[in-house]
Image (spheres, rainbow, N blue to C red):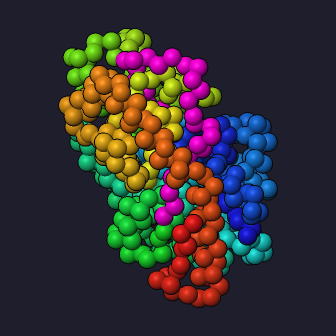
Amino acid sequence: MHILWLKTELLHPVDKGGKIRTYHMLRELKGEHRITYLTLDDGSGGESARARAFEYCHDLVVVPHRTRPKFSAGFYVDLAKNLLSPLPYFMQKYVSPAMRREIEERVRSSSFDVLVCDFLMPSVNVPANISRPSVLFQHNVEAMIWKRHYELQKNPAKRLYLHDQWRKTRRFERDACRRFDCIVAVSREDAEQMKREYGIENVFDVPTGVDVEYFRPSGEVTPDPFGLVFTGSMDWLPNEDAIKFFVAEVMPRIRERFAQVSLTVVGRNPFPSLLELSARDPSIIVTGRVDDVRPYIERAAAYVVPIRIGGGTRLKIYEAMAMEKPVISTTIGAEGLPVRDGVELLLADDPQSFADAVVRVLEDRAMARELGMRAAKTVRENFGWERVAARFAAICEEAARLKFNGARAHEFRAPIV
């Protein structure tokens, strides 16, 4: 197959969940299929990001595109202007006539077998009527993220704005899903939700994967018996909310039992109030972006995922499991992953239950080690990227069959790989 893969960014540095999933998927697909990677690029990755793109594609088409930096004056002006737009802000900022022209030219020339739109955002530039087979790769149900945002927001003005973003997102996402021949979700739960809420049938799921050779303990790092770790891009709102929740409502409860507990937050673009807190409180360590998260995970006694907002699945959980770490997560944090409370991880949703689960892991090291080893065994046996990419490729091939044979959605046969 020749796959035209649409994206809004180059993948290097591979430093956040969506990039990690796409990078490993494409590296596997590239061995069997031809990949043309057509993307917007704000230049932030430099020449290195362009040069290294050939790790995951054969052909690279870059469309220069700038968006406003978060928290800049222009960013807030754009947020205000977005009140008058039918598009949610996170879609509006990726509108690119130049990208649309590039896509239209390739559709006209029939130079590929299947078009894959990676995340919802590039779809804003995809023509309404796509004559070639098309797949929308949904890493999240985006509307669900915005719905949870506004439901948790206490500030009335912010809540009203977030409600507007949810309403716009739901409408756009529903219409976009109906335009593509096939939708790929990253969990069965997401697939069922899109079928139910958007009235579509041709939705299929591929599991989240992990590089099980890369994420292994080195044995060279001495764990801190009272150290906790969280990894994730800190410019993603669900991660920001998670850390604010954990620091304000969970950490004080853990300190009642272990005064020496610490939290290391590893991830790019930490929000300003977190940096200020870290400067005041030495038990909150903020690294910013790092080249390798493994030493930070290996050094911790436990890995925490206090996420209250989100969709899709959390790659970070599989990475921590592969590193043999006990994981404590909210139900939403582990949503969509085939993991069991008390078997591969511990689940807790309210502040006291979450704190109690952390304390249990810190107190009972034998239990913590057993939990981590069971988790590692599960991901190593079931969730390597080779199997994940093979299922994705099979779905793309069936999307082409569906398009060319005029089959109905309920006839779609996505094989189990």
Q: Nearer the viewer, residue 72 or 194?
A: 194
From the viewer's perspective, is 379 left or right of 132? left
From the viewer's perspective, is 401 left or right of 194? right
- Residue 27 makes an appearance in the image: yes
Q: Nearer the viewer, residue 236 or 315?
A: 315
| Span colored in magenta | 205-233
- Is 214 included in the stretch rendered in magenta? yes
Q: Quadrant of the C terminus?
A: bottom right
Residue at the location (63% across, 63% down)?
A: 390
Residue at the location (38% across, 67% down)?
A: 192
- Residue 128 makes an appearance in the image: no
Q: Quadrant of the N terminus?
A: bottom right
The percent coordinates of residue 231 (x first, y second) are: 47, 32
Q: Which quadrant of the structure image shows residue 327? A: top left
- Is 212 included in the stretch rendered in magenta? yes
Q: Which quadrant of the structure image shows residue 28? A: bottom right
The percent coordinates of residue 213 (x first, y second) are: 62, 40
Residue at the location (60% across, 76% down)?
A: 398
Q: Is residue 373 above or below residue 380?
A: above
Q: Is residue 111 above or below residue 362?
A: below
Q: Which quadrant of the structure image shows residue 119? A: bottom right
The percent coordinates of residue 308 (x first, y second) are: 32, 42
Q: Is residue 412 above or below residue 267?
A: below
The percent coordinates of residue 331 (x first, y second) are: 31, 46
Q: Nearer the viewer, residue 118 or 334?
A: 334
Residue at the location (34% across, 17% down)?
A: 261
* Prevailing SS of the magenta stretch: loop
